[in-house]
Structures are given as structure tokens and as C-alpha cells.
Image (spheres, coloured by chain):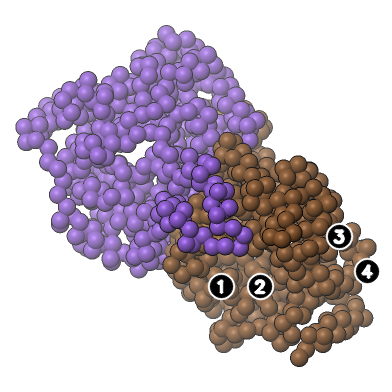
Amino acid sequence: MALARLKLLDKNEEDLIHEQSLRCLKEVGMLVKSPIIRNMLKGAGADVDEKTEIVKFPEGLVMDCIKKAPKSFTLYGRDKKHDMHLPVDGIPYVGTTGLSIHMTDLDSGATRTAKVKDVADFAILGDALDEVNFLWSVIIPRDVPEQAHTAYEVWHSLINSGKHHQQIECRNAEDARMQMKLAGLLCGGAEELRKRPIFSVLVSPDSPLVMRKDAMEAQVELAKSGIPIICMTMPLSGITGPVTIAGTLTLINSENLASLVVTQLANPGNPHIYGSDGVPGDMKTGDVAYEAPEVPAIFAGLGQMAKRYGIPCIVGDWGLCGDSTPGIGRSFSEMSSTALDTFSGTDLTSGIGSTDVAKGASLEQMVIDNYVWKNWKGFLRRFEISEEKAALDITKSVGHGNTFLTNSHTVRNFKKELYFRDKSHRDWEATLSNAMVPEAREIAKKMLREHRPMPVDKSILKEGERLTTEYAKRFAC
Amino acid sequence: MAAVRLRLMDKSEEDLIHVLSLKVLREIGVLVRSPSVLNMLKKAGAEVDDKRMIAKIPESLVNDTLKKAPKEILCAARDPKYDMKLPVQSWPYMATTGLAIVMKDLESGKTRETTRKDLADFARLADALPQVDYFWPCVTAGDVPQQVHTIHELWTSLQYQTKHIEGDSISAIDARKQIELASMLVGGEKELKKRPIFSVVSCPIAPLSFEKGSIEGQVEFAKAGIPISSLSMSLSGGSAPVTLAGTLVNANAENLASIAITQIASPGAPHIYGSNSTPIDMNTGNIDYTAVEQPIISAGLGQMAARYKLPCQLSDWGVDAEDCGVLKTFSELTSTTLTNFCGSDLAQGMGSWGHAKGAALEQVVIDAYAWENYRLLINKFTVNKETAAVDVMKEVGHGGTYLTNPHTMKSFKKELHFRNKKTVSWEATMSQKMVPEAKEIAKKLLKEHTVKQIDKEIVKKGDELIRSYEKSSIP
């Protein structure tokens, strides 16, 4: 089966990125701030300098961990019908944006911080929207202690949606245990959660080449319990990564391999996802330049590296806003920088509902991004290239210079072979426009009013409330 | 050098398209409505049914002619600074749309038929816009006799702009006259063969047939060393099977047949693998340039061209909506723009509207500006030990910044590219707000831009050639 995907590297160039990444890990190494993890790496054969905290990874260790990492696995939903099998067989799974610090108020349109109630709303809308396959922890609630926000995100996202939840932040090992406890409540215990992890966690090295103590210890804790890990490094070319595209690829690949080693040492065979959101930095403002022309090239290169290792990946974004208020605030070619990276061969993509260069989130934007994705999917689907589909017999019977239009082969196959866009909201795909926002807002409101996510037993809800409240109390000043 | 390319098939699927194309040529064959070309094919080893005018081409002949086709082609220009060398390394060379039959009047905005004078305007505008790499005669010269319109179009295009021209032809004699005309500008046919300042599109008629006039013209061009682009129009569900695989086989087979004809006529003659294939709109029967499958088809054919190592022309550019502006949605427009990732060497379409039946000067400006910003996505990058920069990583260290490192200062302008901020604001889809400004720019360029003149003596000779050709060919 054939898929249209963007490729950047030829075989030699791909080899070079791989070799230079191994060289980077062997010669430059990672700064690992956790003694526990340094110890674990040392035990596995890494060269550790306790004084500088730098760990150098021998090639054998890296290659061994690539072998151990599973090549296919499932990200489960609380509702089985939302289970996602990786790698994908065609169109990538798409998720929401995550870790936003502000949102657009659905009534006033004003920008404000979020509460736990908003976390629930984003989950309900994500559950209701057909095209959304999984949720990220969309936004940080500010009405709970800062140290406890992750627990609230996990809990309120899971109980308000039947879809898989990806937690974007895990503060430390204790936080990891709390998140697993909450998810375990909904699965029927830790063992059940290990069998059907209904959430996964995104935890990454900091670019360039740093592994923070708390985050990495959380990663080990999660991996030991079978929770899938998503490594999403984010060097900005020219700022926290080399300005060259080849250098950016090498750094991202090195950091991913290092993260993979940690997961596989903690729990051989644990699901681990290769990922990145690394794009050029805006050399003037230091901002993330998602609209830079080089973005699809970077993601295409990373998709090739992930495929080389056979590791499921998240190397591509979806999310159209690009402005501080909802709508499609970017030009056609700028939008293409984001949208084309979904052709990287990625298994997962995320960003639905994002505004303000991923610092903001918006419910109406979720509706807009969801709609456009539906039309975009046509490009990403599979095609069958076979002797039967090539239809030489039909060509013979149609004859030279004649038409296929009236042939029964055409009538029988056209709905299967051609993709028809939804033309009901063409104005919603206007770039440099926010004309679609009022209608999207009404749809979001209606869905929030009417949609009922898969229910959770009342006693479990109560227990989850108790656990999160108690957890929060420990951090209350 | 690495550049982003859209790829569709794995090796075995690519093999299958090749094998099935050979089977089509061997078992179904091509309909060639020219006794002389059929005869030529017969002599080269094809199995010809003279009555049905069908030539079945054996595999050995296809492979042999593929070998003879050059892998590198020069598309020269009257002004050598616009010479184009194929294959490209990054984005394709871009041309205007071609042979529209109506245009938007720049003053009144009204739709009207086109003349030689209009073509001259399009040519001068294309000459002035740096985003246009070569010229398709945008509009038909409706004020000349239809039997000789192509020669007038070539002559006007040669006079009013200096970039490479890709035109078309209607017969062997027309082809000969075009060759003679262009030869005058470069100092003879030998010189023209070395520096072909024009090329031609020679479309097979899908499925699998060749018209007498254009295929006999193709033979003349091949002999003269004028590059030929066999732009297959395999329209899924119309002139080709509705299935993607069937469309690919049809377009590939037509190209292989056309290449065989060129190479038999003149071994080593420049030939460009081409296609402008997309599904038809199943409701209206029109060509559907908004179809999701269009870039997928180009991606597949891009792989086939790369397999044969042939320069190719497989992509389009231009909004081509019902009116000027950008009256398409984001994903509809992507159906066209994404074709440029297929690895194409040549592309065209700036300035079109109304399913390419219309052209507009202001639309040429709009499409040119958008292309300037979009093409950066198809840029090339160097991937080597130095750019992979592990040594720089060592220098910067863990958690350090690259911003102040000399490597960043040295490389950032080479590696990162920046869109033209002013024209980015024109790229609003579902909008016409950029049209008035584009009109002003078109008017200003037409007022101010001067084109390097052709020597007066040559102009006179060219005019005479056309006059005598008209006399002999029009009853």
C-alpha cells in the first residue's frame, strides 16, 4: 500500500545523521543531573564522569536499546473504541495542543488563565470532536497549587473523555506515582493499568543535551510501570541547537536515542515514542518559528530516522492559528510550513486548538482545526498499487482515445478511489482570516452543552477527587 | 544535497508500475494517427497494425530508447542569464500559464478574448517578474488565422521577453517554421541545437493515442534538438482509469511511448518526462485541479521520472479559481501547490483562472509573489559532517546557547530563509483583497519595464517568414 510522504535524506545522508548522533553521544554525551540515572547508565556500560555529571554512551548500548524498544504497541483509551495502534497504517492520529498557559474565553473572547473546570471543558470537546483521536493535557489550571496541576490535568482529562490522554508534564517521581494512581483508579488497579495504559507521558531532555533530575527520574518511574514514554525534544535551530538543518537533526536524534536508552534500561521492552517539536528559532525574537520554511524538511528528516529505527513517532504538528486570537492568522505559505509536516511519516500529530505559538488554547480553535484536518486527511491516506487497481483490462476495453467516464469500472470505484472534501464550511479554510470564529464558537458551545462523555462510576469519581484534593493540600501554602 | 520530496511508492510498487507500463505498450499499444511515424516505429521494431494505426512497442525498444534519452538538458534563453539547466536541485523552474482563450482586461476588469498585443503584455510582465523563470505563451493570439496561431505566439514571445519559451505545435510544417524562426535569433539551426531557446509541449491524447499534427511536429523538433515535453493528461475517471495505480500506468506508458518516438527520430534528443494529470470532477466532467489526488499522482510520477533519470515536468502553480485573487480554500490550494514537492524540474501555471481557460496579468503578479514565499519550503540543504556540527555541539556544551557561536553567525543566512513579509499579507485564501494592489503593480511594470530588443533586421526577416508561411498555408 502506498502513502505520499515527504522525504529529505537519501540513504547516505540518513546514515550520516545516524553516525554523527552516535558520535555525539559517545564524544559529547549527555549532562545527567540525577545520580540515580547516572548510576543506572553506568551499570549498563556508559562512561560516567561524576564530577561533571556527563555521561557518554557507547554505541553498543545505544544499539542494544534500539533493539529492545518495541516496534508496535497500543495507546489505549478508557473507551476501547478509541484505542490507537502504532505504527499507523495510513493517516496519523491527531491530538490536541498541550501545556498552554492561557485560553480564549468562549463567551467574552478575552484571553485569561484557566481553571480546573476549563481542563474538563477541553476534554469534553476533545471527546466530542470526531477527528480528535487523543488528548494532550491542554492547559494548566491555575486554581490549584502549582505543584499539583499535573494530577488535576490527568484526572479531569481522563474522566471527561474516553480517549487516550497524553500528559505533557510530569514533575518528578512522586508526581509520576500520583498520575499512575489516578489512572489506575479508572482501570481497576496498577496491574490493569500496566496492561492497558490509558495514558502516556511526554518527558524530554532539555536541549542541548541535558537530562534534568526530576523529569528523568519520573520517566524511569513511569517506564517501570509500563506507561508509554514520549520523548519530545525541542531544540530551536540557532538558539538551543545548531543553526544548520543537518545539525538540528543530529541533535534531536541524539537526544531521542539517549532518552530511549533510559526507558529501555528502566524497563526493557517498554513502549517509547520518538519525537520532536524542534524548529528554527526566530533569530530576532528568540521565539519558536513554526512558520519557518525549513520546518517540513526537519520533520521529514526525523520521520526517516524514526522509521530507520522502527520506533513509533510523533514528528509533526497540526494547528492552524499562529496568532494570539482564534482563526487562521497566517498566510498560505506560512500555514503550509506547519501543515506539511504531517507528511513526515509520523504516527501521531498534535496541536488542535493551539493559539499564540502554542502558548494559548482555544475551544473554538479546536473546532476549526478539527474541521480542516478532516479535509487534509485525504492527502495522507493509503492507496493500493496493484495489478488489479492498475486495471489494464479496463484500458483495453475502453480503447485508445476513448473515455472511462461511462465505464462500469469507474462507476464502481470512484467513491473508493477519490476523496471528496466536506464543502460545507469552505470559508473556514480562509488564511489570514478570523471570519470563521463566531460559527466555530457556537458549535463549541453546543457540543459542550450536549456531549456526554463515557461515564465514570460515582465511587471512583469520589475517590479521585479525594486523592487529588489531598495531594494538592500538601502543596497549599 | 538534500531537498524535501514527496514520495508515494516503495520499490516493489514502483517496479510494478514500470512492468505494467511495458505490458500496456506491448499488449495494448498506442494509437498513432500518422503513417510516417507508424512507419518509423515499425522500422525500429514495433509491431504495427497499419489499418488500426496501432503500434505495439516491445520492451527492448522501450529500454533502448530510454537509455538514449539524455539525463541532463539545457533549456536556453534569448538572454543567457535566464538559461535553465535540468535537473534542478531544489525547487522547479516556474512558468506562466499557457494558451488561455480569454483574459481579464486590466482596466475594465471585464472578461474578453485575447490578441497578439495581449500576449506581448503577458510576455513583458513575465520578463519583468523575477519569480518567473520561463514563459508559456499565456494567451492565444486570437487575432491571427487559427492555422498559424502557434508561430505568431512563438514570435511574439521571443520579441517581448527574453526567457526560455515552452510552446506547442500543430503540424510538421508548423514545427519547421518555428525552428527556422528561432534559428534566426541564435545564428542558425546548428546554434539552435546547442542553445534551444524554446521547447515544446507535445501532449499525447489520453488514453494512449497521438494526434497526427503534434506527433509529426514532435519528430521535426527532435531532429532539430528542441526539447520536447510529453505532458500526459491522464484524467482519472475520464481519459484514464479512476484508480490511482491505473492513472500512473497510463501516464507512464504514454511518456515511454513518446520518448521512444523522440529517440527513434533522433537518438539523444532532449525529452522531458511530463504530466498534468489529475482526476476529473465526477459531477461536472471538468478537470479537477482541486482534487486531493493530484499531488499524489505527481509524487508517483516523480518517482518514475527519477527511476529513469529523466528531467521532468510534473507540477503546477497558480490559484486558478473562478476569478482573480485566491478564491480557494487552504486544502484545495494545497492540491496544486503540493505537486511541487514531487521532484519536478519544470512547473507552470502562474496567472490562470477558470480551469486554465482564462489568464490575467494581475493574477500572474499574485501567483508570482506567493511562489516566491512558498518555494523556500522546497529548498536544498547540505548534509555532511560539517553541517551535522557535532564539533560545534562539543564547543557549545550541555545546556549552552548556539546564538552567540560563530557557527551560527556563519551559517544562518545559508540555512534559514525568510519570506518576503510584505507579500505574505497577500496570501489570504478565500479572498480577493490583494487584487487591486496586484493590478497596480502589473500596470507599473508594464509601463516601466523594457525588454532587450531583437535586431531590427531579424525582426523584419521573421515577419517575412511568417507572412510567406501564412500565404502558403491559408487557402
**Could you say where residue B189 lies in the image, as x and y percent from the top left?**
21, 21
Identify the residue shown where x is 71% and y is 78%: A119
Which residue was labeled with disc 1? A355
User: Quick check: marks 2 and 3 in contact, CB under 8 Å?
Assistant: no
Q: Chain of mark 1?
A: A
Q: Which mark is residue A188?
A: 4
User: Quick check: marks 4 and 1 in contact, CB under 8 Å?
Assistant: no
Identify the colour of chain A in the image.
brown
Q: Which three-letter amino acid code belongs to the residue tagged 2?
A: Leu
Which callout, 4 or 3, points to the residue nearer the camera? 3
SS assignment at label 3: helix
Q: Which three-letter amino acid code belongs to the residue tagged 1?
A: Thr
Label 1 – label 2 distance at C-alpha: 12 Å
Label 4 – label 2 distance at C-alpha: 28 Å
Taking B27 as reference, is B172 left or right? left
Q: Is residue B122 shown to the viewer in this render?
A: no
